[in-house]
Amino acid sequence: MIRAVAGRGGVIGLNFYGCFLNETNDSHSRVARMAAHARHMLKVGGSGCLGLGSDFDGISGELEIQDCSQMQKLVDGLERAHFTGTEIENILWRNVMRVYREML
């Protein structure tokens, strides 16, 4: 699915729900897992395929990032995982803005 969406210029939202971030169906949502998932998505789909898709309005469990006021934790985690500044900006806003501009 990542390749298909990326191949059409689309963006996939990085979901923060713990059960989506690991294979054990564990509801603990951790920044390190988000970074690993983001790395996989970029490896498969390229730098333009990933945006934010927190799903704050529909997830439960133990959340390391509980709302948008804590997004710096994700930035810090991506930096710790050696994402470049450009990759982080692409994930946070540039990729989605590109799609908005193309669609509007």
Image (cartoon, rainbow, N blue to C red):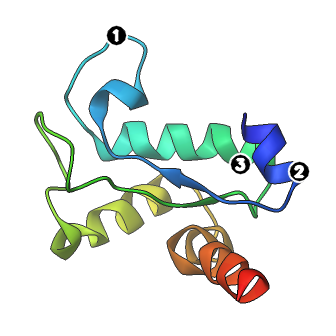
CA separation in Å, label 2 and label 3: 12 Å
Percent coordinates x, y for residue 85 in the rendering = 61, 76
Q: What secondary structure is found at the residue carrying circle 1?
A: loop
Residue 63 spot, x, y in % from top left: 15, 44
95 sits to left or right of 48: left
Instruction: Identify the secondary structure beneath mark 3.
Output: helix
The secondary structure type at the circle numbered 2 is helix
Q: Earlier in the sequence, mark 2 or mark 1?
A: 2
Q: Residue at x 82, y 41 (%)?
A: 4
Identify whether 35 is placed above or below 73: above
Res 7 label: 2
Q: Is residue 78 above or below residue 43?
A: below
Task: Measuring from the top left, give residue 69's x and y in whole percent.
Answer: 17, 75
Which residue type does callout 2 highlight? Answer: Gly
Residue on which disc 3 sits: 42
**Quarter of the image where the C terminus is located:** bottom right
